[in-house]
Amino acid sequence: MTRTRFYAVKIGRPKAKTIARLLIQWRWWLLGIAVLTGAGAYGLSQRLDFDRSIESMFSPRDPLLKPYLELKRNFAGNEIVLAVYEDANLFDQDGTGIQRLTEVAQQLKGVHGVRDILSLAEVNQALERLSGLATFLGRERIPYPIVDPTNDLAQKYLDIFEGYTHGADGQTVSIVCLLDPDKADTQSRRKTISSLRKIMSQQRGGNVTGEPVLVSDGFDFVERDGERLGFSSILLLALVIVCCFQSLRWVLIPIAVVYWSLWMSRAILVLLGLQMSMVSSMLAAIVTVIGVATIIHLIVRFREARHDQLSKQDSIQRAFALLLVPIFWACITDAVGFSALLFAGTGPVRDFGLMMAIASLCVLAGIVLIVPGLSLLGSSSADPQDVWGETTLKDALQASTDFIRRHTKIIAFCIFVVFVVVGSGIFRLTVETDFTKNFKRGSQIAEAYEFVEQRIGGAGVLDVIVPAPKLLSTSYLERVEALQADLRAIVRTTTSDGENETSTQPALTKVVSLADLDRAARSLRVVPTPELRYAGMVQVMPTFANAMRYINKDRSQPDYLRIMLRTSQQGTSEQQQQLIQQITEIAEQHFPETEESPAAQTTGIFVLLANLVDRLLADQFLTFSIANIFIFSVMVLALKSWKLALIAMVPNIVPILMLLGLLGWLDIKLNMGAVMIAAVSIGLSIDSSIHYLWSYKRCRRTGMSVFESIQQSQQRVGRAASYSTLALVAGFSTLCFSQFVPTIYFGGLVSLSMLGGLLGNLVLLPVLLLLTFNESAPANRSLST
């Protein structure tokens, strides 16, 4: 079978040939449409916003979300940033440490977006303002009662606020910055945290921590990574294509297609009122994968036609005639596969699925509008050249098909054994609940959290919300104290590395509520009732008092009291989940649901972050299954054969499951970057399978045997798939320099999944074809099954 006969049969198919001819005939009009729409889309795409709220990462129906939103709505100071620094003179009785603290606290309080602050300076002022304090204690009034070791009330306050306003070492200062919920938009939060950091950088060991800082920095890194990938990966892809094909024209074409597709996708998202999120920040990366892989297939076919001495116009027309149908089905399959994410329970995951479905179709439109015109623009030839080492690649692909033919069953058995062994690691997968582990060790935010963990106490902040009566009573506050005592009794068991010895320590490093302050004030025996003592507290520490109690304006509804908890961010997923469960069970035992009031609830950003990856993981297993069903259905339509469709699925599913299994065996925890890989990878790797099987079907229609068809497909599709994988892995390598660990995981795992998909299509796919179809069976019978 000569190459001429091979092409003549393919190009002779009327629909593809007619459409290809029309694309070339109308190429300048199509290119003009691309320029005009791209210019309009670019301006509109700049209005696409980034949703940085942590609650947007959860389904509106998620039971964890409702109490968190109630906490955020009802209690002032729900979002807390800790500004920390070192001061060896903090408790000097001459007041130098408190004076310095007062100055720093006033600077922080003046930052836009900070509602109020709590520090030892405010506690000292509260003690000073307590009416008759010096007279009641029978001593001369001193200017800094908080540092007086003989002041009983001051010592009680120091014990209550230890772990919030200062460390147990007496040299670590912590200023609690209560953020203003009315200034929680993206730009305000970024400016607030940046201003706080600038102030604290002037202090010894100064830094800021807190869940709002984690979330803000995480989104900043993700947004920055997306921008870096949009530039750096394109630059690396351009270098790879230049090195491989030595053609500037064919460097510009994929860049133009990718950017046009991105602008159009983002413009459509703006029109639909959607926002980017931490999940969908890799939109540019995946559009790059789809666009570049498709263009390289066109480059290879175009170059082959030029080698056959065809003109540039005839060459690009032949390439489109050969590839237009598989390109169409590849983009449709991508869109359908990503649309499976619409079944996820998490809002950003659903939005990401819609975004990628739109982007996949935009890539298809970009190829149709841009490639015919740009490939023929100008008079210079600038044809893509033979790749260095291409002869070696051809020989390797030829040798691989010969080897697969001789040892088909042995290879299939070996792959099956390796898949079972490696894939079983999936059952060992665990998730990363420590959000601080999402940042590189040594980064500013990681060092700040390490400082808080060691010097202040746990960096994890969570809350228990309990119903409260309209008038506080001593008996009610004693119930709260009993609950706090049981919470303090929760212990965490740890095992020493390399030893069998275990030790226990309190799981909660701090438990504080209004009941603690009331007990301290009660010892003065001046104010007779808790309600009056609370009124006095509102006078001396208004923001903190309001942050601890919510008075419902609806007299028929209960009020609420807040118990603030601190714990270590470190620990396994099981330990974090178990701790939250224990807190919830203890709280509900003390404050169960009644006809008059709801049960106590455990909430806070710590609770959301501890469950975030679990929620995403549950979505991914569901959507991965649905995506496989959708893709299989489309493949049946595209290939008109359920056998070929099933064969196409296996080489793409097996590498993904093996990759996840390998993570389990290596005890690598799933973070946000790793947990998204399954649903994303199946949509990316299936494209090469479509091109491979479409080529295989063409060859079979010409009368070639199964093995001859595999040989042809291995050479043509295998080379294009190898080049595109090389280019894309080079582009994604830029993500390894991110400061955000999930981005590093995403870049690395996408690269590995693409390499696994390449091996699956070049090894497992021909093995399955040889095992499924009888070599002597007629072509028409083989393809109609």
Image: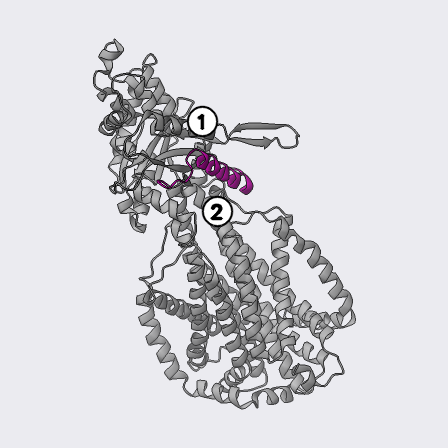
Q: Position of residue 87 (x, y in %)?
A: 36, 24
**Camera sees residue 220:** no
* Badge 1: residue crowd in 10 Å (few <14, some 14–19, many ≥20): few
Q: Position of residue 316 (x, y in %)?
A: 50, 82
Q: Is residue 155 above or below residue 471?
A: above
* Badge 2: residue crowd in 10 Å (few <14, some 14–19, many ≥20): many
Which of the 4 image quarters holds residue 526? top left
Q: Which residue is mark 2?
A: 611
What residue is at 50 percent from the left and 36 percent from the top?
Answer: 582
Relative side of 353 to 174, left or right: right
**Which of the two residues, 402 or 656, is positioned nearer the viewer here?**
656
Relative side of 318 to 207, left or right: right
Q: Is residue 162 above or below residue 695?
A: above
What residue is at 37 percent from the left and 43 percent from the top?
Answer: 212
**Which of the two residues, 545 or 15, is positioned nearer the viewer here?**
545
Specify the segment rendered in magenta: 571-597
The amino acid beneath tag 2 is Asn
Which of the 4 image quarters holds residue 126? top left
Q: Position of residue 42 (x, y in %)?
A: 33, 67
Q: Which residue is mark 1?
A: 485
Q: How many marks?
A: 2
- In this view, the residue farthest toward the front is 595
**Camera sees residue 19:** yes
Dominant secondary structure, magenta: helix
- Residue 583 magenta-drawn? yes
Q: Position of residue 740 (x, y in %)?
A: 46, 48
- Residue 188 magenta-drawn? no
Q: Please state, as top left, top right, bottom left or bottom right, where the N terminus lies in the image.
A: bottom right
Q: CA distance from mark 2 to mark 1?
A: 26 Å
Is label 2 or label 1 in front?
Answer: 1
Q: What is the secondary structure assignment of the residue under circle 2? A: helix
